[in-house]
Amino acid sequence: MEPELIRKAIGGDAAAFGQLVEMNYDFIHSTAWKWTRNRMDAEDIAQDVCVRLATAIRSFRGEGRFRTWLYALVLNAVRDLARKSVRERRRAEEWGSDPALQARPADEDDMQEIWTAVQTLSPKQRDCVMLVYSEGLDHAEAADVLGCSEPTVSWHLHEARKRLRTILGREVA
């Protein structure tokens, strides 16, 4: 039955795809949980894999078992989440170590003040700040999006921090 569902899902049959996801969801979730040992991460990964599966299924050639192929898809999602966590931790450390922003209270009004100040930056500085600190891209990924070099992104972020210190009136010790 599964080979027929796979064939139909590859052909665009939404009902077959839904059945295939339903048949494999527990496997996807349990595999994600085994790798992360975190219920929330496993749920996020399972949802992500189900979304990815909608387009990735077209690349399944049937040369191996579907579960083996699906396992690789889940493992890639686990790795993606791990890389994202590292980027977020690095971003938090970068902003947390910036003396101009360290003393900020964690309230909604203050965050609004910061993002309003970001909007006054030059377009290149604003784009770099938004891609790195809001979208979670690393400097290399932001450089790819902006069509510039990684050092250029780093320089724009450095200049943006200096400008934000001035705008927000918070001096560096």
Image (cartoon, grey):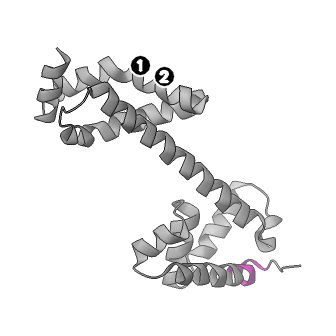
State yes or no: residue 29 in magenta: no
Magenta stretch, residue numbers: 164-169
Q: Residue at x 61, y 68 (%)?
A: 115
Crowdedness of circle 2 by 10 Å Cα count: few (<14), some, many (20+)?
Answer: some
Secondary structure under the numbered disc 1 in the rendered image: helix
Residue 93 image point, x, y percent: 73, 61
Q: Residue at x 49, y 30 (%)?
A: 32
Q: Amino acid at mark 1?
A: Asp
**Which quadrant holds residue 70?**
top left
Quarter holding the N terminus is: top left
- Label number found at residue 30: 2
**Which quadrant holds residue 96?**
bottom right
Q: Residue at x 71, y 66 (%)?
A: 94
Q: Amino acid at mark 2?
A: Ser
Depth check, front residue: 121 or 134 = 134
Q: Which residue lies most toward the top here?
A: 1
Q: Residue at x 55, y 51 (%)?
A: 83
The residue labelled by disc 1 is 26
